[in-house]
Amino acid sequence: MNPSHKETLPILEEGKNKIKESDTYKELCKEHGVDEDIIDLIPMAFSDLDVSARTENGCIYFNYKLLDNFDSNLHYMLHEFTHALQQCWGDGPTQGADDGEYLDNKFEQEGFQVQTKYLSETEGDGAAEAYTEKVMNHHDVPENDKEKRKKDLLNLASMI
């Protein structure tokens, strides 16, 4: 049986507090013109999902499987927080993850760029590159298209 929302709330709060310390998060808030404490107001919960995480109508849901090591999966929180900003503070509706080619979706690309920048900041450029490779393999990106996709999704601290 999965833990209750009450049981997972402290885990999410701890994750939010760690995210708020990162330069990537602070820059994202500045770019979107929101206060850095806004993440405390974004509803988040764990749920049974067929993906790692998703954002719907500004609410973020994480797969229960991420609970096993949530601290090392905080990059998903930053990716989804990007979508919450897009959905709640953007200029209009966002393209859904299921609408069109996932990796061509500009909203997903922004989420991945923020996510890989955070990974690069907290775990090093190698971790960001490894995650990007994992995403491309998961989405069966052809070998001859990987370099372009990598540029679309990757945001390394050493490149900034």
Image: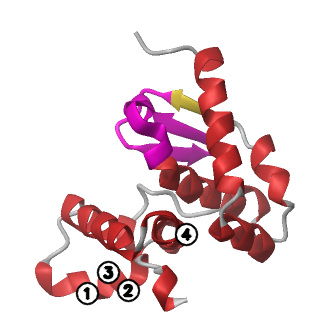
Front one among 99 and 110: 110
- Numbered tag placed on residue 34 in the rendering: none
The Cα–Cα distance between marks 4 and 3, rounded to whole angstroms, is 15 Å
Tell me the quarter of the image containing the N terminus: top left
Q: Is residue 84 visible?
A: no
Q: Position of residue 142 (x, y in %)?
A: 14, 76
Are the residues at dot 3 and dot 2 in contact (C-beta closer than 8 Å)?
A: yes
Left/right of residue 29 with respect to residue 8 in the rendered view: right
The residue positioned 48% from the left and 90% from the top of the image is 159
Q: Which residues are magenta?
A: 47-72
Residue located beneath label 3 in the image: 149
Magenta stretch contains residue 17: no
Residue 5: name its quadrant. top right
The Cα–Cα distance between marks 1 and 4, rounded to whole angstroms, is 18 Å
Residue located beneath label 4 in the image: 114
Secondary structure under tag 4 reads helix
Are the residues at dot 3 and dot 1 in contact (C-beta closer than 8 Å)?
A: yes
Left/right of residue 103 with respect to residue 7 in the rendered view: left
Instruction: Kindly identify the amino acid type of the residue bearing the numbered disc 3.
Output: Arg
Residue located beneath label 1 in the image: 147
Secondary structure under tag 2 reads helix
- Numbered tag placed on residue 151 in the rendering: 2
